[in-house]
Amino acid sequence: MLSNMLPNTEIHANKVALIIKQIHEKIEQKKNNGHLAISFSKNSVAHVVPNPKDARFHKSKVDLKSLNQIIEINPLEKTCVAESGVSFVDLVEQTLKHGLIPMTVPELKTITIGGAVSGCSIESMSYKYGGFHDSCLEYEIITGDGRVLTLTPSDDIFQMIHGSYGTLGILSKLKFKLIPAKPYVKMKYESYNNFNDFFKVLYEHSNNFSDGSKNSFDFIDAIIHSKNHFVICTGTMVDVAPYLSCYNKTKIYYKSTLKRDEDFLTLSDYFFRYDTECHWLTKSIPLLENEIVRFLFGKYLLGSTNLIKNARRFRHFLKLKKRQDMVVDVFIPAYNFENFYNWYKKDFNFFPLWIVPYRMPSIYPWISKEHKARIGEENLFIDCAIYGKKNNNPDVDYVTVLENKVFDLNGVKTLISKNSYHIDRFWQIYNKDHYQQIKSKTDPYSLFENLYTKFH
Ligand SMILES: Cc1cc2nc3c(=O)[nH]c(=O)nc-3n(C[C@H](O)[C@H](O)[C@H](O)COP(=O)(O)OP(=O)(O)OC[C@H]3O[C@@H](n4cnc5c(N)ncnc54)[C@H](O)[C@@H]3O)c2cc1C
């Protein structure tokens, strides 16, 4: 059989019809009440830092839970068609049966393919392939007036779906490329004690991919453990592994990169190597790094889904904190990374800092023309993921400080957590005209929020 048919397209069409029915009901409610704020309910947790004041908890829900099936994996074409609520851990499990993987696999198991496109996704293959959306060939979206559109990369609307965070329509089905895989990953950890040596090598590795024969890695990321301890993590897929390490239980992946210079993992364990700790968010509750606690209670406490669910459960206690800890990715053009790092180590001084080289095939159309001009020709960005910095100084909101610095350095801050932009500054970065033009086509009743208001 050419392709492996799972639930058929008819079942999918029925699910879409039920979502459209909900959309029509919401439109009626909005007409009657004058105002209605919408959010989506999915099977997996939302990858946002639980905020007790998050309006999302009180919004009217569109239920997308049924959109959780892989529709087709085509090994010859090396493509997959799947519903938007499929998580990466389920997706990889199925594609690996065909010796294939998606071109970008975010590190947390239950990030969904629809969420990765609507929000953001960056990982260790991003230095070659960009974000997951850059490997997509087709989107099916449900518009805010209940139409179904099938979009390909040549459509304006397609290009604006990435980074629209559910404000232009509901992604219901995606078709995307797959690439060949091998069962294991050989890891190399290169340690440096100064920024210049570290970045010189990281930059070279990130630019060597075009010549497949020479120094080309399948995976590249890095962890800055402290001001003077930089580790570049490169991975190569291999057929045979002399031994295998496992970081799903008592052992801690990010700490292993401090001690080892080589390691072997199964490909699936590699993809989700940061999931057990949600990168290093367990560090803020030291008991979670205790081996005995991990052995006894790890099943209930560890893993990004447990960690996010528990934080959500206790979100009302978080009200005690003036502001939540920071969990944010910022993309800095490679030419300004040194400037950023010099500022960061002085003013933020929070480690580990996760570093992921990220190549945008071209500057995305949701970025404003003036910001694009500031960025210039560079298409290699360095994603700096600041996961867990405290932000409770009553006199300084580090979110605002970061937003200003990233703007000054021609970068882009993702919207995955707290945002404090003034509206004028926001639309200096995001492409207002283009966004409004697309929104008028896909959401004529403004059923979904506006990108600025959703996050502010
Ligand atoms: C602690 C933490 C760690 C992270 N680590 C990584 C990482 O290692 N690698 C990485 O690539 N990314 C990482 N991220 C970022 C994450 O990938 C993005 O936040 C992503 O958008 C989350 O997708 P999700 O499936 O969880 O969707 P959600 O978080 O539920 O949604 C994200 C946005 O997309 C919208 N949305 C969701 N589904 C749909 C749909 N079907 N149609 C339209 N809009 C939709 C939602 O309304 C929301 O605005 C991390 C985020 C956090 C908070």
Image (cartoon, rainbow, N blue to C red):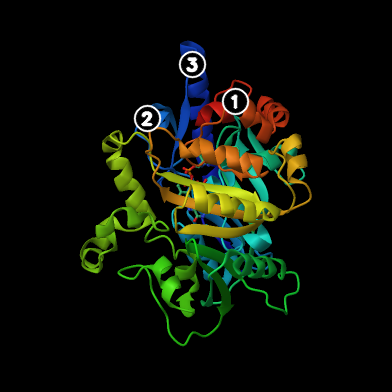
Q: Of the residues shown, which amino acid type is indicated by label 2?
A: Lys
Mark 1 or mark 2, which is nearer to you? 1
If you read the primary sequence from the N terminus, does the residue marked by circle 2 or circle 3 appear first?
3
Going by the picture, which residue comes out furthest to the bottom? 242
If you read the primary sequence from the N terminus, does the residue marked by circle 1 or circle 2 appear first?
2
Q: Is residue 201 above or below residue 238?
A: above
Q: Which residue is mark 1?
A: 423
Percent across and percent down for residue 265 are 46, 76
Q: Quadrant of the N terminus?
A: bottom right
Q: Is residue 7 above or below residue 36?
A: below
Percent across and percent down for residue 278 are 40, 56
- On residue 53, the disc is 2
Residue 338 visible in the snapshot: yes
Q: Is residue 129 left or right of residue 387?
A: right
Residue 83 visible in the snapshot: no
Percent across and percent down for residue 121 are 56, 52
Q: Is residue 323 left or right of residue 85?
A: left
Label 1: how many Cα within 10 Å (few below 14, some 14–19, many 20+): few
